């Protein structure tokens, strides 16, 4: 678990669900370069994501693990893959309104179709070049936290 910055009042909270350490570090770097003050929470697999979202076990402290405004979800992960996590999020009455962006290396048509079918708000293929990846994350951050009106936060 990595936290870029602890939550303070109106700071946007993003939950990154990503098992690849290099991609985690790259995302942290991109958020640090962003213009928006963001609390980036990171979990390493799909099961950990659901534990975080449901406030189970070590994730029960909402001060330390706040409700996310946005979820960035990888597809290929151990324990539970991103599609399974997405299905569970969309079936849960308290979680289903949280925007979920699939952020993955997969450009397979079935992954794209399944993700939208299961309720993804967006599907983005991770660029290979570092600067392109940082640019994508900055645009994502700007869209979701500047242009979009997000649903009100619930309490865990």
Image (tube, rainbow, N blue to C red):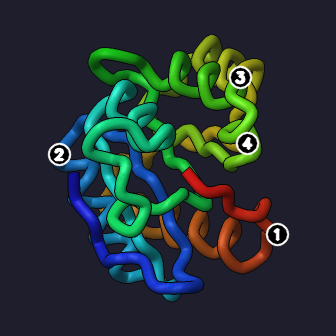
**24 shown above or below 90:** below
Task: Name the residue tied to disc 1.
Answer: 149
- Cα separation, mark 1 vs mark 2, equals 31 Å
- Cα separation, mark 2 vs mark 3, equals 29 Å
Q: Which mark is residue 121?
A: 4
Crowd band around label 2 with a 10 angstrom C-alpha radius: few (<14), some (14–19), many (20+) = few
Crowd band around label 3 with a 10 angstrom C-alpha radius: few (<14), some (14–19), many (20+) = few
Task: Name the residue tied to disc 3.
Answer: 91
Determine whether label 3 and label 1 are within 8 Å by CB. no
Comparing labels 4 and 3, the label whose residue is closer to the camera: 3
Q: Position of residue 94 (x, y in %)?
A: 70, 40
Q: Which is more toward the observer, 97 or 115?
A: 97
Task: Name the residue tied to disc 2.
Answer: 21
Q: Secondary structure at mark 4?
A: loop
Q: Residue at x 30, y 44 (%)?
A: 43
Q: Residue at x 26, y 44 (%)?
A: 58
């Amino acid at each position: 678990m990595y936290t870029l910055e602890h939550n303070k009042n109106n700071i946007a909270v993003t939950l990154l669900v990503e098992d690849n350490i290099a991609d985690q570090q790259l995302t942290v770097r991109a958020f640090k370069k962003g213009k928006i003050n963001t609390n980036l929470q990171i979990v390493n697999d799909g099961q950990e994501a659901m534990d975080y979202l449901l406030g189970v076990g070590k994730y029960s402290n909402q001060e330390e693990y706040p409700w996310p405004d946005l979820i960035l979800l990888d597809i290929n992960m151990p324990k539970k893959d991103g599609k399974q996590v997405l299905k569970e999020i969309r079936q849960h009455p308290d979680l289903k309104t949280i925007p979920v962006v699939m952020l993955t290396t997969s450009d397979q048509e079935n992954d794209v179709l399944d993700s939208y079918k299961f309720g993804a708000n967006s599907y983005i293929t991770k660029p290979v070049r570092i600067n392109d990846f940082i640019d994508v994350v900055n645009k994502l951050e700007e869209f979701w936290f500047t242009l979009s009106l997000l649903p009100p936060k619930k309490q865990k």
